[in-house]
Image (cartoon, grey):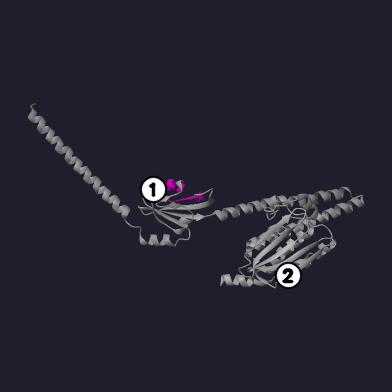
Amino acid sequence: MDAAWYVLLSLLLGFAVGALSVHLLGVAAQRGRRVMAIASEPVPDGIASMVAVLESAGVVLDGSNQVILSSPGAEALDLVEGRHLRVPTLVEHARRIWRTGEAETIELAHRRGRIGTGTELQLRVRITPLGNRFLLLLAADRTEEVRLAGVRRDFVANVSHELKTPIGAVAVLAEAIEAASEDPERVRAFSKRMQVEAERLGRMTKEIIDLSRIQADDPLEAAARVPIARVVDVAVDRNRVAADAKRMRIIPRVLDDVEVLGSEELLTTALQNLVANAVQYSPEATHVGVGVRVQDGIVEIAVTDKGVGIAQEDRERVFERFYRVDPARSRVTGGTGLGLSIVKHVAVTHGGEVTLWSRPGQGSTFTLRLPAASHHREETA
């Protein structure tokens, strides 16, 4: 074959390759235009409006898992950063849903915050396709729900453990009485001890019921104006007998005639517990002070004793359920470890707090701080 044929074949091959290249470029350009059209097509108004008003966290993703829309809740939970999801687990699930087309609900722990350790949140996320072009993520913060479930489990476990002691003691004492039926002195001693354990069991049962009721109710939903002077009078009067038995004086000093909003019964119970603790853990022939004053719209009810005091490492824990600084002393005094927990819950549910100052060997001061009624009303008006 001479050179002319080679030139002709080369020209024909070049034309074929060029035509094919132009065709492929045209197809690619057409597909690119379709993809760009789909990607640039706006999210329907209904979806955009829904995401904008969501109280929970909502995020809309496109086919490349880019964030198209996000609600304020999603930003509050720190789920998005610009046009990207911050949670790799959600990205993995989104990819799978693009493949399967089936909605999923997942539970995950997400650490909010980018400085320090942050806060770990427990989230329930529902991911579902929106047509063929978008995915919708709805995230609910279950952190408080999970925490409360843990609190309930711990509470049931603690109650079961604490009730075993007096119930077991009563059973043992009953057997001892039966074995000592021929010895009146021992029977009387065992009977007296059984009465102590029965009283402790009754007191613990009552305080468990009180604590459960306080945790279930919101006293500010149907709040009444409560005169603090009357609360002090009743709480002090209920502890007179115990104080007289130890030759102690309870000295109330109400500097301001003031009212708070809430439940008089619960507030009286809280203050009665503080006074009872002061009487129990103070030496004989001392005194307990109950003072009331108003400072910057806050009613401060302080209960001061001359007792053994509380060490620094125990001060944060004394408000925990069933926590006792001195378990051996609590068995003698009949303490249940629930009184201060009840005080704390009453304070919190009334929009206040309880604080503690203490020095070992010198005594303690527990202060119940609550918004004054007039001040509270001005804030909520």
Q: Amino acid at mark 2?
A: Val
Position of residue 211 measured from the top left corner of the image (x, y, whole percent): 68, 60
Q: Nearer the viewer, residue 287 or 58?
A: 287
Instruction: Assess whether mark 1 and mark 2 are in contact (beta carbons under 8 angstroms).
Output: no
Q: Nearer the viewer, residue 258 or 135?
A: 258
Position of residue 125 measured from the top left corner of the image (x, y, whole percent): 48, 52
Q: Of the numbered discs in the image, which one, if any, rests on residue 98?
A: 1
- CA gap between label 2 and label 1 equals 69 Å
Q: Residues within 10 Å of mark 2 (few under 14, many from 20)?
A: some
The residue tagged 2 is 254
In the image, is 189 to the left or to the right of 52? right
Residue 266 shows in this picture = no
Does the magenta run of residues contain 92?
Answer: yes
In the image, residue 306 sits, relative to residue 31, either above or below, namely: below
Position of residue 59 measured from the top left corner of the image (x, y, whole percent): 42, 55
Of all residues shown, which one is farthest toward the top?
A: 1
In the image, is 107 to the left or to the right of 348? left
Q: Nearer the viewer, residue 185 or 34?
A: 34
Range covered by the magenta-colored residues: 89-113
Q: Of the numbered discs in the image, which one, if any, rests on residue 213?
A: none
Residue for point 50% across, 55% down: 140
Q: Residues within 10 Å of mark 1 (few under 14, many from 20)?
A: some
Q: Tell me the element at label 1.
A: helix
In the image, is 99 to the left or to the right of 264? left
